[in-house]
Image: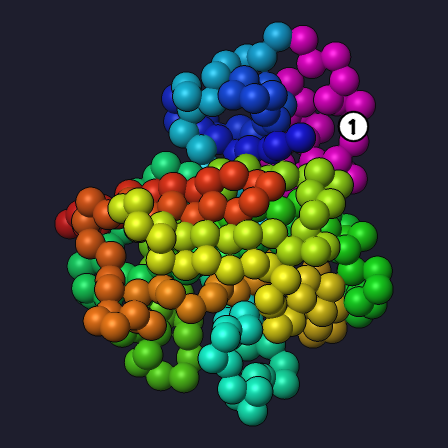
Amino acid sequence: MKFVSFSRDGQLSWGCLRELELFDLGARHGQQYPDLKSFIAAGMPFDILLNLGDPDMSIAEVELAPVLPNPDKIVLAAINYLEDETDPDKIPDYPVLFLRLPSSQIGHGAPLVQPRSSQMLDFEGELAVIIGTGGRHIAQENATNHVAGYSIYNDASVRDWQKHSHQFTPGKNFVGTGAFGPWMVRAEDMPGLEKGVALITRVNGEEKQRTNTSRMIFDIPYLISYISTFAPLLPGDVIVTGTCTGFGITRNPKEFLKPGDVVVVEIEGIGVLSNIVEAEQPT
């Protein structure tokens, strides 16, 4: 089962998909579950998915929003993939983490915004973990029981602003740079994730990144346990698990995104997240 947040005629809602047919669960159950986060917090009660009847519309009739437009927190990991050339002495002892603001997010198909203040917009294809059951001090052996589902993230980064200091925050929070989608796949529908799934990023059809989630330095249970030690995780929180090499600033010569470029991130078992780059418009 796949779940989406979407906008139609300026109205934000959420629903589930059967192939490309969309069931508007916000319209049907909005008083009880006004958004996907509230449905997740309620334990994703399966009874509202029974006897759905006819679909309300096609997915082509709506604009997809970030899967979770309103998480309490988005925690992202950096330096979290083993590469063939990784120096064992340079593997971090603990995860390198930073935060992203929900207002920086966009959905599948929305423009990825190149800011006026920089020409160094970069791409990072990543696996996103969506928390279902919250908690504090979550044990690693129980951590996957706290996962509602998985999605795809493009943690597009403004590199010069990221490098202004040791703090990543400015370069990771420009408006229109956190692509999140196209949907959430339930955890139980991704049994292969335990052994690892393929992650590929392409720009204008050319492959730039390829890895497998089994190559994470700090795996999903560890990240959940570690993060929940310092901050209580809440339903709908998002953990973005890092990227492999191959993004623009790691290439020789360096490659940064420009208006008209199309960035596609594909994760086995989830689907494809696609966004076209547009220049920031004057306000």
> Which residues are the magenta region?
26-53
The residue under the point 55% across, 13% down is 56
Instruction: Tell which residue pokes out farthest to the top in this image.
Output: 54
User: Looking at the figure, which quarter contains the N terminus?
Assistant: top right
- Residue at disc 1, secondary structure: helix
Residue 274 in magenta stretch: no
The residue under the point 63% across, 39% down is 185
Report which quarter residue 217 is drawn in.
Answer: bottom right
The residue under label 1 is 46
**Amino acid identity at mark 1:** Phe
Return the x and y of residue 225 as percentages of the image width and height: 74, 68
Foreground: 6 or 188?
A: 188
Q: Is residue 8 left or right of residue 282?
A: right
Q: Is residue 151 left or right of residue 176?
A: right
Report which quarter residue 25 is drawn in.
Answer: top right
Foreground: 281 or 267?
A: 267
